Image (tube, rainbow, N blue to C red):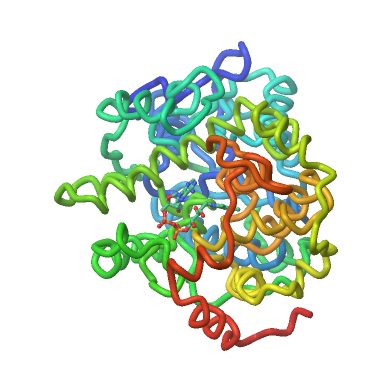
Amino acid sequence: MLDNLNRVKSLNDHPVKDGMVVYWMGRDQRARDNWALLYAQGVAIERKQPLVVFFGMPAEFVDSGWRQYDFAIKSLQETENYLAQKNIPMVVVPGWPGQVAAEFVIKQKAGLVVVDFNPMHYVLAEQNKLAQQIDIAMHLVDAHNIVPTWVSSPKLEFAAYTFRPKIHKLLPQYLTDFPELKNHKFNIELNLPKNNWKQIIKTITADRLVDPVDWIVPGEKAAQAQLKKFVTEAYSNYSELRNDPNAEVQSNLSPYLHFGQIAPQRVALVVSQLPPSTQQEDFLEELIVRRELSDNFCYYNPNYDKFEGFPDWAKKTLNEHRSDAREYVYSYQQFEQGKTHDELWNAAQLQMVYQGKMHGYMRMYWAKKILEWTPDPETALNYAIKLNDKYELDGRDPNGYVGCAWSIGGVHDRAWFEREIFGKIRFMNYNGAKRKFDVQKYIDAVASLSGQTLF
Ligand code: FAD
């Protein structure tokens, strides 16, 4: 079952009844190392009940393009096959997840619904709505964070330095290994619909122009292979070169982590077993502290994607510089097509458009320039989030909302020297980038990418 019951929260006061346990899979799209699935199976075994994984496939989701659907679907098919080996059916139904999940749970006369945790408020609202619609227990499990978000801190944290000691204190208790998923003996004579993937895919209306990418293979197995590759080939240079977009030393795990195709806890377990080093410290700081801080921000701040969600000092300084003259102002389309005067910015934008993943260092530069070249911070945040969500494989993620809010609105950052437009928000410029890495090499590399049919 679970190593720690603090990973679980009840979403209503109803009892667990006789009937199948349904794990309504959302954010954590994997069969291995999944606390929500392990918990669901534990209860099902204890009560000698069937266990079914349910997934609702929306026709469109936030600003996702077809690229993100393709990445998720191929992985879900792999997960479905792996679950079948454990005698656990996975039912995928097209439609709005909250609605089709409610229909399924009621029709099957389930005894318990288990859901995984996602701090996005629209997801929490859907889950709470279902919890109120049914007369059986519904349990929420944080299968994405090593320390559950509601345990690591009971409030909105100001910055990494306030959050870090809290999470480090709890890690020995929560950074434990996962048990194996068992073959489920109680799934007999279940009369469930078979997934018709062709039909499911036909219902998806996401933008097909945002086409799949071929440099990264989706799925749980590919995610494990990528982790291995990172640790053996890139990890030793992580601290030294991670801010150089020409060096391939980032882990490239964010698409897998976003879709839950690999557990952050598995990644942390593998890396923390390596000998102590600066790269271990730096990588675990990003993977654990920064990533879990993003969930903290979105969970406790309903304005995570708005100007109102910025800290007071940042709102004040941005308001004071609202009417500063902007030397360049671009439309959404000009940004989207990478048609600014700045070749480096255009390259970053096009790397995201063509590859579905912009280098981490360039993401900061990219968002800060959007602040500099739009009429106001609200427009800047809106454009940055929209582009990030549409093209990044790892978009629509707490890390994305926080990354944009950090760059444009000083979230989790501190005040810097005051200047035009930015006020006291940290500034970045072309010359700074030039001092850090070979800018021309990066621009040339992006220019050589193929498949440029979008615009
Ligand atoms: P690595 O350097 O190998 O890091 C490993 C993991 O640590 C990442 O996968 C991620 O889970 C976590 N991590 C790394 N950097 C950060 C960070 N700054 N904040 C929080 N967690 C971090 N990340 C996303 O996952 N999705 C997004 O949509 C996203 N959008 C961003 C937008 C902007 C404007 C900015 C400034 C940052 C954004 N980030 C986003 C954070 C970060 O840039 C990416 O997580 C990272 O570049 C992903 O590549 P990687 O997995 O190879 O990173």
| Percent of width and height locating residue 175 | 29, 34
Look at 31% across and 57% down and name the residue there: 239
Look at 76% across and 59% down and name the residue there: 373
Question: Does residue 267 show up?
Answer: no
Residue 113, compared with residue 269, is above or below; it is above
Left or right of residue 262, residue 238 in this image: left
Q: Nearer the viewer, residue 447 or 14?
A: 447
Residue at the top extreme, as displayed: 13
Q: Nearer the viewer, residue 101 or 260?
A: 260
Residue 416, compared with residue 74, is above or below; it is above
Q: Nearer the viewer, residue 375 or 175?
A: 375
| Percent of width and height locating residue 233 | 27, 70
Q: Nearer the viewer, residue 58 or 171?
A: 171
| Percent of width and height locating residue 363 | 57, 59
Left or right of residue 138, residue 196 in this image: right
Quadrant where the image shows the N terminus: top left
Quadrant where the image shows the C terminus: bottom right
Residue 359, compared with residue 168, is above or below; it is below
Look at 49% across and 49% down and name the residue there: 260
| Percent of width and height locating residue 195 | 64, 58
Where on the picture, by quarter, is residue 388? bottom right
Left or right of residue 152, residue 127 in this image: right
How many badges with numbers are in the image? Answer: 0
Residue at the left extreme, as displayed: 275
Left or right of residue 211, residue 157 in this image: left
Question: Does residue 299 show up?
Answer: yes
Look at 59% across and 38% down and name the residue there: 24
